[in-house]
Image (cartoon, coloured by chain):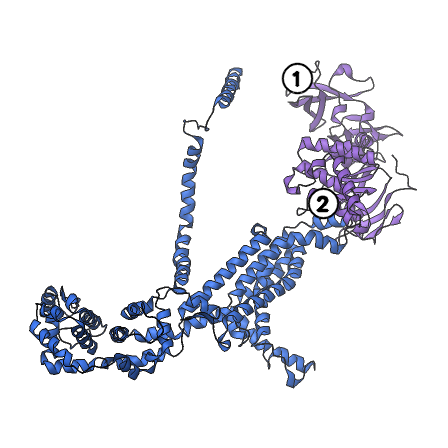
Amino acid sequence: MSSDTQDAFVAFDRVQKSYDGETLVVKDLNLRIGRGEFLTMLGPSGSGKTTCLMMLAGFETATHGEITLGGNPINNIPPHKRGIGMVFQNYALFPHMTVAENLSFPLEVRGMGKSEREGKVTRALDMVQMGDFGGRRPAQLSGGQQQRIALARALVFEPELVLMDEPLGALDKQLRETMQFEITNLAHRLGITVVYVTHDQTEALTMSDRVAVFDDGRIQQLDAPDVLYEQPQNSFVAQFIGENNTLEGTVAEITDDMCVVRLDDGELIDAVPVNVSGVGERTKVSIRPERVEMNKDRLAPDAHTLKAEVAEFIYMGDIYRTRLRVGGHDNFVVKTRNAPDQRRLKPGEQIEIGWRPQDCRALDA
Amino acid sequence: MSDATAGNLSQAAAESRRTDAEQTGPMLAADGRPLKQSLNRALRAQKLRALALIAPLLLFLLVTFVAPIVDMLFRSVENQIVSETLPRTVMALEDWDETDLPSEDTYAALAYDFREAAERRRHTRLGSRLNYEQTGLSSIFRRSGRGIDDVGEVYADQFIALNAAWEEPATWVALMGDPDWIAAQAEWAATEDTEAREPSFRLATGIENVLPETADAYRSFARAIQAEARNPDSPVEEEPWNTVYLALYRDLAAAPASAITGYSGPEEALLREAADAVSGFETVNLRETFAEIEEGWVEMPVWGTIETFSDPYTAGYFLASVDLRLTPQGIEPVDENQRIYLLLFQRTIVLSLSIMGLCVILGYPIAFLLSNLPMRTSNLLLILVLLPFWTSLLVRTSAWKVLLQQQGVINDVLVWMGIVSDGARLALINNQLGTVIAMTHILLPFMILPLYSVMKTIPPSYVRAAKSLGATNWTAFWRVYFPQSVPGIGAGCILVFILSIGYYITPELVGGRTGIFISNRIAFHISDSLNWGLAAALGTILLVLVLVLYWLYDRIVGIDNVKLG
């Protein structure tokens, strides 16, 4: 699913937001979300992602700029007229109503007849496999069940756009993974557009069509999960998404698709120039831990090799996590699969490591 | 951990699983005792500690709160004063048919009782007590206290004329006193110990059978003068009351000759002489004697009232609390112009409900605002809400007097602005309006605080969720926010209503004549009319009323829905 600029379903156009008139929480946000797309806003707390969601829902007004929904500006439309479904962080199920009454509420306020309401409520409950729970109170349900009800309530009035504000934050790990799967499934089956806010990168990567990484009130990168992970556009994204090794240095030589970086300890390495512009510039070189090879036999012919000293070797079941001293850093991590031929290393051992130059990206300092 | 220990441990775990599964009956602790018992033992120290922590307060409450309430409940039905002050009269009235005035015997009993009561100064207290039931009784009793001395004087004179020995206290002591007592008295008199009291008088054995009324009357005389607080007298030095001579005459006149001739003891000759002479005595009619002292004693209603209230326990106070009274003919409503309590109860409830309603209307928006403001601002505003608590209640109420009176600030401003004319200043105080205004102001914090603490716990996401689901601002408030704030309203209403239903000082100061509450009447009976029984009955009704409302509230709203924070 692509975000065609022409028929973007939701569009933020140069949106800014300030609460106190002194600092901007959201700085010049431009974002287009296609119909049926599952877009995740990911970022550390205070990065502006929730504010963006609240502006879209209508609970906050943009200080500047325009938000359109289906081509129509919605800046001045109150929340209840926007027809956007929303799932809140703590579910916000009305405690004084039963589950069925909770689901019936959005239909009631739309003036829908009783029999029609009942049919829709039953279907919505069945959709989240909670058909037998209509008569219960929210307080009688477990966290996961409440989550399903909140989801059903946001969907029961058939909105085209559903916003989710860290909906899985309060669940334990196993339940969270099940729900991730269910939410994406449901969203794709119903063909609704979802804007999902989270600070959990795994959630973002597994669920989304595209992920917008927020930091400091700006979108740092907006891409599909695989692109985001493998081709981070700046060092913030590289650091924030997944685990990452950073080597600092200066650009020594630069060509169209390759550059040479002189690390702080004098070592020269090849890297893909991503956002470095000239020789002599400071840069952070990023290499994913799983792209580093410790087994000489498996190294590609064009691989760049370096000397390293083992600082720590951690057994993690499916993988080994090895911390190395490389190029003056002692926090260089390598992850290797727990394969039969993988030797267990001892701290202090001198080894040789290597990687393909194209896995090594020179980013902004 | 070595492999061996790991193996042992897993073996032990398997073992314990097996024993758990095999065990039947009550769970046993490791030492073989039932688990429940072990648990209780483990918790006992904790419970004792908890009890010790609350013990001082519990004791304090028992002494200062529970005991007075029980005492008050008791006072509202207690009526022993009649049967204690007029014991013989009450006995004599038991078989009175209430169609005509009581018999001579009853008047004689009244004479004995009243003489003792007058000596012990109890007759006025009984008079005030019975005056609650029938106006005028107080003055009858008070005046009779003076005249009672002369009842029986005719007989005293005749006995003394017959033989001067009857005037001698020693004669009476010898005739009536127990020899042991006489000896003890003589011993006491010889010691000249001013600290020790004279031994309490005791009747000689057998004299009651010969002269029943005289013995009774003399004993009451002897004990009464001995018991006088400031300067106790001794029966060995005092001539008996005239009523004792009356009793002697009645005994001798009624007794068969054989009883007196059969008597052998001190002064038997004197007694025989008197017994022979009484048939020739001039007699008086006791009913007429009492009628001379006070007309009331020959009026049926007076006797009816005494008879009606002779029981040690009475519903009279409770009946009076609801404008009814107990009459010899049964329960009747009091006169139209004396009905006051039902009206006061009704007014107290209606005004309390209006104050409660006003507090909800005024307090809800404030609490709503407070709970939605940022912490710093809301704390500041909360201090303003609490500010009245730091000022004396009296000062606040007096301030309302300054503001509301006819020449007060509000009226002055209204006149100055031309809204009301100088001649038609508004009556804002010394009426029900004044009470409602001042009490709403005083009780408002009690509404705001529980409301605020409940509203603070309602997350803003509920209203947001409602709006996102398509509810307008009003629907979101009414269907989602308001139901969740109901526990706060409930708590506030209970607090304000219960506080206001028993409020005293503010209605007293600003209520005037029409704006006072039932509590003002209770205070009046406690400190002015001294009718504590009625005050206790009114208080009991108020207490029951509050408990009933509390129960109703629990049935309708559910007491667990009340949240104070």
- From the viewer's perspective, is the residue at label 2 or at label 1 nearer? 2
Vertical order, B201 against A207 (above or below): below
Residue B128 in view here: yes
> Mark 1 or mark 2, which is nearer the start of the sequence?
2
B57 to the left or right of B176: right
Q: Label the blue chain with its letter.
A: B
Residue highlighted by disc 2: A102
Position of residue A73 in the picture relative to residue B337 (left or right): right
Residue A174 percent coordinates (x, y): 68, 30
Furthest-bottom residue in view?
B423
Q: Is residue B565 visible?
A: no
Q: Is mark 1 on a helix, strand or loop?
A: loop
Above or below, A289 against B79 in this view is above
What is the chain letter for disc 1? A
Name the colour assigned to chain A in the rendering.
purple
Count of labels in the image: 2
**Crowdedness near tag 2: few (<14), some (14–19) or many (≥20) residues, C-alpha within 10 Å:** many
Q: Distance between the residues labelled 2 and 1?
A: 56 Å
Q: Which amino acid does label 1 sit on?
A: Arg
Q: Which of B263 and B565 is in front in this view?
A: B263
Q: Position of residue B287 (x, y in %)?
A: 28, 79
Q: Where on the picture, by quarter, is residue A221?
A: top right
